[in-house]
Image (tube, rainbow, N blue to C red):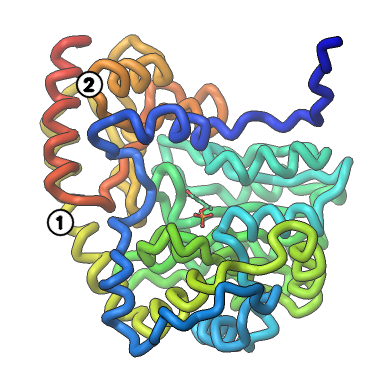
């Protein structure tokens, strides 16, 4: 007898499927949305920790008090009980949705977006209401539109700025407006803030949990910090929601890995040094990508305001999955098809990352030049 799979369906995670298929087969990866990861030695050199006697045991399921305290100090008036350590931003988002969203709820999500932010609530039975970020207005969300979309069945408004994949930004005035709409409608605001530390110098944008008691923030060491392999992230919000997510986490991952937490503690103690190094990489690489886009008539972009990714539109007639597939298979260079970030409007775009090694970025762009000549 052939056993028939009887799974409960969740939409495949397009961008992660793409990485699974190509990441380890290409020669040059300019698709990443983070910053050149630190080596273990570089992080250890910043601290005075002795690692070799660390017991590889279970650790506190909410994260160690030291790490939670350090994370809480990145907010205005929070303490360690307002923080729950998670396995990256992915687990953080997953826990929040699992605890707060149920069948029949409406969840307003910016589009385009990182797919987890709309596919997981959809899987949980929520109705996803897209809040469009439009190219014509630099992908900045419109509060009047949010007011039209919100309803008594809205459970949550989900935002992500600096934004993946467009690099768009909001400011405190807009964040306050979003939180007020949430409060007036008894809806939570989930703010995926994994790029927040990369906001430009002088730009004022607070963490959402510092703005409203209805707001929930998600952070990670994967993006702005350059430690994706630590698999450390966290949730910042009211103690009540933290407690609910903590209870749920005990069914999912229970706790983080002890080595990741130790690295996270060193990283948070050296936050300024880490951000300094990372911003230097971004500034240098951003100029390279900017010059590259400007010399191509086939490319148009809304210059990202922050973050490490750009989302150019192109004029070739190939659809984005086909274009990026050919680039990966024929030239061994990886970028991400725009189509994997949401609806039809993302077609004829691709996402490119500029947080990794400058040399590889330049080499990758040179190969893409030749590919464009070939298909143009
Ligand atoms: C907006 C956003 N949120 C969350 C994540 C998850 O990252 P991690 O689980 O590595 O922290 C990503 C990764 O690309 C992302 O872009």
Q: Position of residue 63 (x, y in %)?
A: 63, 77
Residue closest to the eye, 29 or 305: 29
Note whether 93 is above or below 371 in the view shown. Answer: below
| Label 1 – label 2 distance at C-alpha | 25 Å
Q: Quadrant of the C terminus?
A: top left
Please name the residue that numbered disc 2 is placed on: 331
Q: Residue at x 62, y 46 (%)?
A: 117
Query: Any mark on residue 339, and which?
Result: none
Secondary element under disc 1, as helix, strand or loop, is helix
Please name the residue that numbered disc 1 is placed on: 284
Q: Is 350 left or right of 84, judged from the image as shown?
A: left
Q: Position of residue 193 (x, y in %)?
A: 52, 62
Residue closest to the eye, 124 or 106: 124
Q: Residue at x 55, y 48 (%)?
A: 142
Q: Is 204 left or right of 66, judged from the image as shown?
A: left
Note whether 31 is above or below 324 in the view shown. Answer: below
């Amino acid at each position: 007898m052939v056993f028939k799979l009887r799974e409960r369906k969740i939409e495949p995670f397009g961008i992660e499927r793409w990485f699974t298929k190509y990441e380890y087969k290409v020669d040059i990866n300019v698709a990443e949305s983070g910053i050149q990861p630190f080596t273990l030695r570089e992080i250890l050199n910043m601290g005075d920790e002795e690692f070799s006697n660390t017991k590889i045991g279970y650790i506190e399921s909410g994260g160690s008090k030291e790490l939670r305290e350090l994370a809480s100090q990145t907010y205005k008036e929070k303490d360690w009980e307002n923080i729950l350590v998670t396995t990256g931003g992915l687990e953080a988002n997953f826990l929040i949705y699992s605890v707060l969203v149920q069948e029949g709820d409406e969840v307003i999500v910016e589009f385009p977006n990182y797919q987890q932010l709309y596919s997981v609530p959809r899987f949980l039975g929520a109705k996803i209401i897209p809040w469009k970020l439009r190219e014509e207005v630099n992908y900045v969300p419109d509060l009047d539109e949010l007011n039209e979309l919100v309803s008594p069945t809205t459970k949550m408004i989900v935002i992500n700025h600096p934004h993946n994949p467009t690099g768009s930004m909001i400011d405190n005035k807009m964040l306050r407006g979003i939180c007020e709409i949430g409060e007036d409608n008894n809806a939570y605001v989930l703010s995926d803030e994994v790029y927040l530390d990369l906001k430009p110098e002088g730009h004022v944008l607070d963490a959402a949990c510092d703005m409203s008691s209805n707001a929930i923030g998600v952070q990670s060491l994967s993006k702005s910090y350059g430690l994706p392999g630590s698999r450390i992230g966290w949730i910042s919000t009211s103690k009540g929601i933290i407690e609910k997510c903590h209870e749920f986490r005990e069914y999912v991952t229970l706790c983080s890995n002890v080595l990741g937490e130790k690295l996270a503690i060193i990283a948070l103690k050296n936050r300024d040094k880490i951000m300094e190094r990372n911003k230097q990489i971004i500034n240098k690489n951003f100029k390279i990508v900017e010059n590259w886009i400007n010399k191509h008539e086939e490319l148009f972009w809304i210059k990202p305001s922050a973050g490490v990714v750009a989302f150019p539109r192109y004029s070739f007639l190939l659809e984005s999955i086909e274009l990026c597939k050919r680039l990966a298979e024929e030239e061994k260079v990886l970028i991400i098809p725009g189509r994997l970030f949401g609806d039809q409007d993302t077609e004829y775009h691709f996402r490119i990352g500029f947080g990794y090694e400058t040399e590889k970025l330049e080499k990758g762009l040179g190969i893409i030049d030749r590919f464009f000549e070939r298909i143009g």
